[in-house]
Amino acid sequence: MKLKHATWRALMNFRKFGGTGPSVSEVGLGCWQLGGDWGDVDDYTAQKVLEAAVQNGINFYDTADVYGKGRSEALLHKYLRPLAPGAFIATKLGRFPDPGNSENYTFENFRRFTENSLKRLNIDVLDLTQLHCIPTELMESGEVFEWLRELQKEGKIKKFGASVESISEAQTCLKQEGLASLQIIFNIFRQKPITELFDDAKTKGVSLIVRLPLASGLLGGKLNPNVSFPENDHRTFNSDGQCFNVGETFAGIPFNIGLDIVEELTKMIPEGMTLAQMSLRWILDFDAVTVVIPGSKSPLQIPDNASASHLPSLSESLHEKLSIFYDAKIVQHIRGKY
């Protein structure tokens, strides 16, 4: 059953993408888990997750060509498009098929990667393509952005942005003309963007897409010391940054330390909220943020996440308390690019 745009609006608050762009749901869906690296997610589960997202007013979906070697994109075409043909799909390029391989970074390959995403999504033009955590020196050279502008001129992409791993990379990208968005790690465990990025992004009219809002599930409040993750889950194989930036796993916080921090955070949850809702609402209280993209392997998690859109803002005193707590108890444990 298709949901009309007016129905979406009744369920979800929206924010302008890029200041003047299309309206997107302020809670989106990260789709890394549909491709892999979070344990197995079969087609039926993926379908139910996407159905739940649409039913809860979500119209922003973040994927990448490398997620499951294109599987995440293909599943969005198969299950999302029939339900929500007007949904905003953001994809990424630069890490497929071989992350970090210098041969990825040519204009010819960028065009080929883009055309492959278009085929998997079965669309004529991408809403947004993002550089996918590419080497810092390539961002600094600026040539990759010229390639994106050329793809824009060719009508293959509407907007382009960059998914980055550090504030310095974000600041480098902000210098580029035509940049529509930055995708950053931002959550209660990683608060530096508040003082070192938000004002600059707002001045430039650049949208901020927030990934890892729940720190790989730690801020969901349901993990415990006895939990066991599958071998093909990055929370197992990248717990200490063995395969890629450790900041992408638990936001760079060692798992057991993270559990201790979460135990203290639970004492601050406002009445009527879950830890996940408080964590998402905390992010949404910053007007520099356009959309937050928690992932989910279960359709049952979607309503709880989406409901953060309509929860009341956290009090100023709680914001201050969480800031002080970050400085006192969290910042010293952060690992990885920041």
Image (spheres, rainbow, N blue to C red):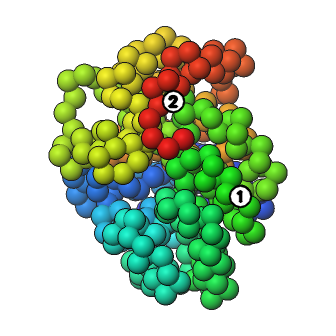
Pointer 2 residue: 189
- Residue 174, numbered circle: 1
Relative vertical location of residue 112 with respect to residue 84 in this rendering, above or below: below
Q: How far apart in space, not on screen, are marks 1 and 2 (Cα)?
A: 24 Å
Do we see residue 40 in this rendering?
yes
**Tag nearer the camera, 1 or 2:** 1
Mark 1 in CB contact with mark 2 (< 8 angstroms): no
Image quadrant holding the N terminus, namely bottom left
Residue closest to the eye, 64 or 75: 64
Upstream in sequence: badge 1 or badge 2:
1
Relative vertical location of residue 136 with respect to residue 320 in this rendering, above or below: below
Please give left or right for residue 299 compared with residue 227 in the image: right
Q: For label 2, count other residues whose C-alpha is less than 10 Å away and answer few (under 14), some (14-19) or many (20+).
A: many
Q: Residue at x 33, y 69 (%)?
A: 98
Instruction: Give the total number of marks visible in the rendering.
Output: 2
Q: Where is residue 58? Give x, y as percent.
A: 53, 52
Relative vertical location of residue 66 with respect to residue 33 in this rendering, above or below: below
